[in-house]
Image (cartoon, rainbow, N blue to C red):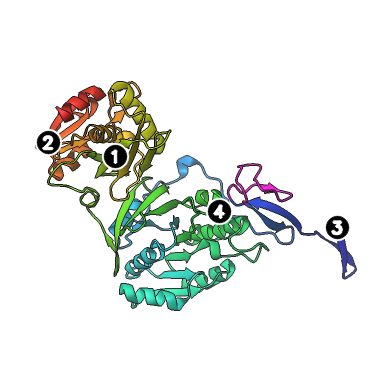
Amino acid sequence: MKFVRTKGARVALSKAKTSYQCAECGALTPKWQGQCPECGAWNSLAEIRSGAKRAQQAHYAGAQAWQQLSELEGAAEARWATGLGELDRVLGGGLVAGSAVLIGGDPGIGKSTLLLAALAGMAKDHPVSYVTGEESLQQIALRAQRLGLAEAPVTMLAETSVEAILVGLAGQRPRVLVVDSIQTLFSEALESAPGTVSQLRECAGQLVRFAKESQVAVFLVGHVTKEGTLAGPRVLEHMVDAVLYFESDSGSRLRIVRAVKNRFGAANEMGVFAMTDGGFKEVRNPSAIFLARRTEAVAGSAVAVTREGSRPILVEVQALVDQGQGGYPKRIAQGLDGQRLALLTAVLHRHAGAAITDQDVFANVVGGMRVSEPALDLPLAIAILSSLRDRPVPSDTVLFGELGLTGEVRPVPFGLERLQEAAKHGFGRAVVPRGNASARQAGALKLVPVETLSQALKAVFE
C-alpha cells in the first residue's frame, strides 16, 4: 500500500492487481495456467488488471424502486416492423422498444448486410443510427450503394469507445441502434484490451442499460468461435433480451436466422433468406426450397415434416448405407444429431432385422437445415432402410414421428399443422403416429396411422 500527501492529508493508493479471467466462463484465477480450473477450457485465460479503476454498476436496469407484482401493468409491448418479414418473425412479430438483441454468425455470412437493410426499412418511420468499430464509413457507403440503400436516412459513426458512443447518442436520440461489433468496443473504466471478458461484460452492460433507460432498441453484432458459438462468456447472452444466430452451409446462397433466446417471442423461431447480388431476399415458402421433389422416387430418400418455432417445414432426409471399409463402421450425420443416428441404427437392427452393424451409415438433411427435434426419427429410419434394401419410398408419401427404443412410434406435437403443410404441397399419403391421426384430416391427404416400426415398414414398402 502506497501513500501520497495531498494538502496535508495522506491518501492511500491501491495498487492494480493482475489476475487472469477465462474467456469461456468468466472465472478468475490469481495466476496463469493452461486450463481453466472451472470449465476445463484450454488456453482461455487472459490477463486483466483490477483496482486501478472501477466501472459504475449501479442502476443497471433503471431507478431502484420496490413494487408489488399485483400493482404492475402487463400492457402489450409495442412492436416496430423492420421491413423484413422473416426477421420480424424471428423477433416474435417485430422489434420491441428498449430491447437488446445479440446477433452472431460466421465472418462474411451477412450480419452487417441484413442489419443495414433493416435500418433502411425502419428509417422511414424512426430515427436510426449505425455504429461501426470494424469497418470505415466509406466501406459501409460502398455496401449501401451496392444494396441500393445509399439514400436511406441512417446516421453513421465510426467509434470504439463505448463512453464516446453514448455521448454521441445523446445528441442523435435514435430509436434503433446497431453496434458492429461488441468485440471491438472498449470502456475507459477498464485497462484491459478490447475483446476481453471484462471489456465485453462492461461494454454490453452499458449499452443494455442505455437501451432500457432510453427505450432504444439495440442490435449488438457478436463474433463467433470456430465451434460456431458466440465468442466471450455466456453471461453476454444472459444480459440481452434476444440471441439470434446466422446459419449457412459453405457455398449455399441460403441464410437461416434462428432465435435461440427471445424474451418477447418464441425461441427456436426461424427466418430464411436467399443471398443475391442485391442483398437478402426473403424466402416466404421454405418448404419449396428445402424440398427437392423428383419425378421418380429414388432409394435412400424420404420426405419429413419438421417444425421450426411456429412454422411447419417440409424437408428431404437422405441416407446412404454402404459396406464398411474399416474395422469400425461410420455413423456420420449432417444437419442431424450424430448420437441420435447411432441410436436409430441400433433400433433398426433390433426391431427391423436390418443388418447394418458392419455398414457405414451417412445421413443428411437437404438444403443446409439443422433439425434437432425427434419428429425426424421415423423418416430417417425409413430412409436408411430404403438405401439398405434399394427400395425407394413412394414420391407422394410424407412421414413424421418419434421412435422409441422398444420400436414404438410415438406422436409429436402439432400434428395437424404438419399434415396441412404436407397437403398444401400436393402430397397424397402420410405415414404418421396413431396419436397424430386425428379425425380432422388435412384436405385429401390419406392418413396411415402406425404404432410400431414394423407397421411403418409395411405401410411404406408393401
- Which residue in the structure is indicated by mark 2? 445
Say which label, 4 or 1, has the lower sequence index.
Answer: 4
Cβ–Cβ under 8 Å for marks 2 and 3: no
Q: CA distance from mark 2 to mark 4?
A: 49 Å
Spatial separation of the CA atoms under disc 4 and disc 1: 38 Å
Please tell me how crowded label 2 is: few (under 14), some (14-19), or many (20+) other residues with Cα within 10 Å: many
| Mark 2 and mark 3: Cα distance apart in space | 81 Å
Q: Residues within 10 Å of mark 4 (few under 14, many from 20)?
A: many
Depth order, front residue of 248/81: 248
Percent position of residue 397, x then y: 16, 37
Mark earlier in primary sequence (3, 4) = 3
Q: Secondary structure at mark 2?
A: loop
Circle nearer the viewer, 2 or 3:
2
What residue is disc 1 on? 320
**Quadrant of the frame with the N terminus:** bottom right
Confirm or deny contact between disc 1 and disc 3 (CB under 8 A): no
Disc with the residue nearer the chain's start (2 vs 3): 3
Q: Residue at x 61, y 64 (%)?
A: 187
Q: Is residue 45 magenta?
A: no
Amino acid on which the number 4 mark rests in the picture: Gly
Q: CA distance from mark 3 to mark 4?
A: 33 Å
Q: Which mark is residue 232?
A: 4
Q: Which residues lie in the magenta part?
A: 24-44
Instruction: Kindly report which numbered mark, 1 or 2, lies closer to the viewer in this rendering.
Output: 1
